Amino acid sequence: EELITATKISPSFHVHLWVSKTKGHITATAIKALMPLHTADIFLCGPSVMIFSLKKQFKKAGVPGRRIHYERFKLF
């Protein structure tokens, strides 16, 4: 709900929900289909394996490392 509100306040802020149960694992290619990567700052949060994979994909797609931000978490 807070993210949807933020999209109404800031037109440059976009939210794209991805449900892996129905769409599979998210990839840089899937994100590139939703938005231009050359102007984006990428924010990731998730398990280390997912973060490592996506960072590698984004860098291969030409996104500079300084524009990829992430937070890892671990479920117990």
Image: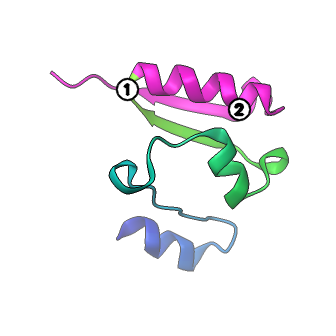
Residue 43, given in percent of the width and then of the height, sits at 57, 41
**Region in magenta:** 48-76
Q: Quadrant of the C terminus?
A: top left
| Residue 46 versus residue 10 in the image, above or below | above
Quarter assignment of residue 61: top right
Q: Which mark is residue 34?
A: none
Q: How is the image coloured?
A: rainbow
**Near-viewer residue (5 or 51):** 51
Decide: few, some or many residues near mark 1? Use Cα within 10 Å; few <14, some 14-19, many ≥20: few
Q: Is residue 16 left or right of residue 5?
A: right
Q: Quadrant of the N terminus?
A: bottom left
Q: Is residue 24 magenta?
A: no
| Residue located 52% across and 43% down the image | 26
| Residue located 62% across and 64% down the image | 13
- Residue indicated by mark 1: 47
Q: Is residue 58 magenta?
A: yes
| Residue 20 versus residue 66 in the image, above or below | below
Q: Is residue 48 left or right of residue 29?
A: left
| Residue 45 versus residue 2 in the image, above or below | above
| Residue located 44% across and 36% down the image | 45
Give the residue at the far bottom of this rendering.
8
Residue 36, given in percent of the width and then of the height, sits at 79, 54
Quarter assignment of residue 19: bottom left
Residue type, numbered disc 2: Phe
Decide: few, some or many residues near mark 2? Use Cα within 10 Å; few <14, some 14-19, many ≥20: many
- Residue indicated by mark 2: 58
Residue type, numbered disc 1: Pro
**Near-viewer residue (12 or 21):** 21
Residue 10, given in percent of the width and then of the height, sits at 62, 72
- Using the numbered discs, state the Cα–Cα distance from disc 2 to disc 1 in whole angstroms: 17 Å
Quick one: label 2 or label 1, which is nearer the N terminus? 1
Helix or strand or loop: what does disc 1 sit on?
Answer: loop
